[in-house]
Image (cartoon, rainbow, N blue to C red):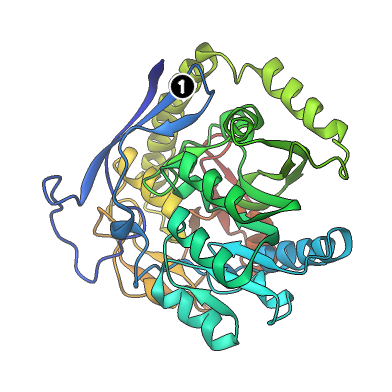
Amino acid sequence: MIKSFLNLGVQPLANQYLKKPKILSEKKGELYNLKVCFDTKSKLVSISKKIPVKKMFNSTYPYKSSMSKTMLKSFKNLSENIKKKFNPKLFLEIGSNDGALIKNFNLKNTICVEPCSNLAKITKKMGYFTYAKYWNYSLSKTIKKKFNYVDVVYAANTLTHIANLNDVFRSITNILSKNGVLIIEDPSLLECIKKTSYDQFYNEHIYVFSTLAVSNIINKFGLELFDVKKINTHGGSLRYFIKRKNNKNLNISKNVSSQIYTEVKFGLNKFSTYKKFGKATCESKKKLILLLNKIKRKNKTIIGYGATAKATTVLNYCNIDERIIDFFVDTTPDKINKFMPGKKIIIKKYKKNIHKNIDYFFLGAWNFKKEIFNKEKKFIKKGGKFIVHVPSPKIINK
């Protein structure tokens, strides 16, 4: 049974940054009602409305993993671990983005799959064999025919974007070698619930996974978890290591049962936990609005830091507009001089002297807080402050 526990209201497509602000239409597919649901059988948490993939992942997709030092470091460490532990003869990445991970692998034994043509061009230019297509069973057959079986399949923050999970895992099992390994990483549902980070939900994040749900899904495809690792990216993620059940060469780590035990103890298998999260989200919204209004009544300046998809959810759910936040700053070229989705808040290019006459930054990219704080030491030293909404709305400077 699928039960709804959170309504984040009418939302725009999170990464559709406009050159000019306009009134968006639900009939034209520019707006949708963002409801979040829990499947009591599979333990999957998902949004109720599935947006057509071509509206989300196309030639104008703005996010580039290489823009973040945090992501580059994480991918560098992971690539070294994969080569050392699994030594794949053939490596495939689903959702290779701008090559932030793939550049650490040999050109000759690496395959990229990236549906956004603007990003696929980057890895093609780097010399990697790249399919500018959506991942599905048909593509897996094409790859298998050309390359045979793949030893390691990797997908970071990608499976959460694909509605048909049955097709995803059917496709992967079709090309995964007998002793092959599937590695996926996505935001952790446990961390999301603990931190009341409701902004993890938007049109691209069709799912936010728990270990419980992943284990249930892959089981019917003859796959099983053999390890789970916590990582700090995207506000707290989990990296899942998966193998075929008949592969006895890899031992199952205690991390798997330990993580599942932790999730069950917390209540991720119970609908009541999600109802509490829904109430906590409503309280978080009220507190954030009160905090921002209090600051503006003192005639203080608030600038958004990081024009993220997460920030889009927060702005539209809490009805925060240009009267509260003057503008956003970002380093992503494709976002500059455009407007936040659903709002008349312009995005400006980040500059070193951007702090002049700014009292507060609203931290849209809160999941990169450590990286940002290292970058903004001068601003903080001069008394500059940041407003965060995760895990609860407050003002911080350290």
Where, by quadrant of the figure, is residue 164 drawn? top left
Camera-side residue of 272 and 40: 40
Give the quadrant of the N terminus. top left
What kind of residue is marked 1? Asp
Give the SS element for disc 1.
strand
Q: From the top left corner, tell me how far across and down residue 183 is, in percent.
A: 69, 51
Residue 288 location in percent, x, y? 43, 37
Q: Is residue 269 above or below residue 94?
A: above
Q: Residue at x 55, y 67 (%)?
A: 145
Residue 60 in view of the camera: yes
> Which residue is denoted by mark 1 in the rendering?
39
Q: Is residue 237 above or below residue 17?
A: above
Q: Toward which corner of the image does residue 373 lie, by quadrant?
A: bottom right
Q: Is residue 380 left or right of residue 309?
A: right
Residue at 52% x, 59% y: name it. 140
Task: Name which residue lies at 53% across and 62% down.
Answer: 95
Q: Where is residue 260 drawn, in percent x and y? A: 72, 25
